[in-house]
Image: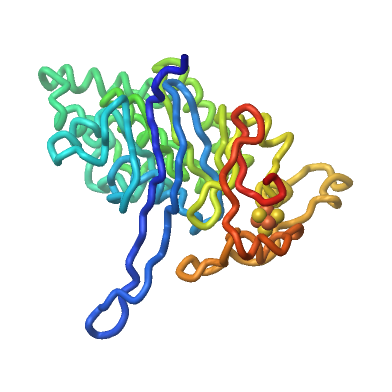
């Protein structure tokens, strides 16, 4: 018997209207998220990877309803997220938080980091008095590797990595169950990336957190994810346990992404093939398999028929006619 996942996303769709002309008439649609389905178990990390324009961030935001889904199912902890009213949504946001790529943009530059972290505790009525508030904020700062001396400082006084730690402390303040990490380490240097990923791993262990970890680079999600899903032009094209996906990728796009990961040994790097061409225009995506114009092993059927997303072995899913 399998237990109900913490997050269940089924056939999620998000279309954006393209409006043109003086009258701003809708002339086209972008299928930013096109029938996306996945689960996240309690305490699990799902890495969600794709190039820019793949729909991965829109997917993350639809899960939290920061962007309204066009259709599909989002269930969190047994609750239908798409059916919640504004008041219920505020309560849900305690359990589901998001960390953005640029914490500087999400922090008020005129607010001390102590006030920024404490804000959520006050909004959700989680502290008894000022002393309690200060103690909780210091505790959160220490949890993310900062300390009480940072309490009265302003965001501009912090490095990028420290600001991301503040962003994490802010998310943790309300004791969430799930955090959507939306390109949370993408703007950081590689060594700082590793520190933040280690911190997120430690926090997961300590608090039993689940993550939807969104990144454009497969190497970033490798060590933190139990499972990885790869998106291309709004669709998940492959999803598998992390080790399986890195060792035995089945989709040519995943293979190409893996070959684009820098390899330190030049003899190995020579055999690595880079991803060819640009991501096509999502307003007018290629027919059949969206990847076919860039695919080195495409067949005639690939431009005609959309490949089904199928399970090929235990937990390994792929949408590719090579595996029909
Ligand atoms: Fe390549 Fe065809 Fe598979 Fe698409 S379905 S990835 S075009 S082989």
* Depth check, front residue: 91 or 294: 294
Q: Is residue 209 left or right of residue 272?
A: left
Does 172 appear above or below 258? above
Residue 119 horizontal side relative to residue 269, left or right: left
**Horizontal side of residue 205 vs 29, given as left or right:** right
Q: How many marks?
A: 0
Q: Position of residue 147 (x, y in %)?
A: 36, 24
Q: Is residue 292 above or below residue 85?
A: below
Q: Is residue 197 above or below residue 105?
A: above
Indicate the quadrant where residue 180 lies.
top left
Q: Position of residue 222 (x, y in %)?
A: 61, 34
Q: How is the image coloured?
A: rainbow
Does the rendering let one see residue 95?
yes
Query: In the rendering, at what x and y percent does residue 321 appear?
Result: 67, 51
Q: Residue furthest right?
A: 267
Residue at x 80%, y 51% (from the top left corner): 272
């Amino acid at each position: 018997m399998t237990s109900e996942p913490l997050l269940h996303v089924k056939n999620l769709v998000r279309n954006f209207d393209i409006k043109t002309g003086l009258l701003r008439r809708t002339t086209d649609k972008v299928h930013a998220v096109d029938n996306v389905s996945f689960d996240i178990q309690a305490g699990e990390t799902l890495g969600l990877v794709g190039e820019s324009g793949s729909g991965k961030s829109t997917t993350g935001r639809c899960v939290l309803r920061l962007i309204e889904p066009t259709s599909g199912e989002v269930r969190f902890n047994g609750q239908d997220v798409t059916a919640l009213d504004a008041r219920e949504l505020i309560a849900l946001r305690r359990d589901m938080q998001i960390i953005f790529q640029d914490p500087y943009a999400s922090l008020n530059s005129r607010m001390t980091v102590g006030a920024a972290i404490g804000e959520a505790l006050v909004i959700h009525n989680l502290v008894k008095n000022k002393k309690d508030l200060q103690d909780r904020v210091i505790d959160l700062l220490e949890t993310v590797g900062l300390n009480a001396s940072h309490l009265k400082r302003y965001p501009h006084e912090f490095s990028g990595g420290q600001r991301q730690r503040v962003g994490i402390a802010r998310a943790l303040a309300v004791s969430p169950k799930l955090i959507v990490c939306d390109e949370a380490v993408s703007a950081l240097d590689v060594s700082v990336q590793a520190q933040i990923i280690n911190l997120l791993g430690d926090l997961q262990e300590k608090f039993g957190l689940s993550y939807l970890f969104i990144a454009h680079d497969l190497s970033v999600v490798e060590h933190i994810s139990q499972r990885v899903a790869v998106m291309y032009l709004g669709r998940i094209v492959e999803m598998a346990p992390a080790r399986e996906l890195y060792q035995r990728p089945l989709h040519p796009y995943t293979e190409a992404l893996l070959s684009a990961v820098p390899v330190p040994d030049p003899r190995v790097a020579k055999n690595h093939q880079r991803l060819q061409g640009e991501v096509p225009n999502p307003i007018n995506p290629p027919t059949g398999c969206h990847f076919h114009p860039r695919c080195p092993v495409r067949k005639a059927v690939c431009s005609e028929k959309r490949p089904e997303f199928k399970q090929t072995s235990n937990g390994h899913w792929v949408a590719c006619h090579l595996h029909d």
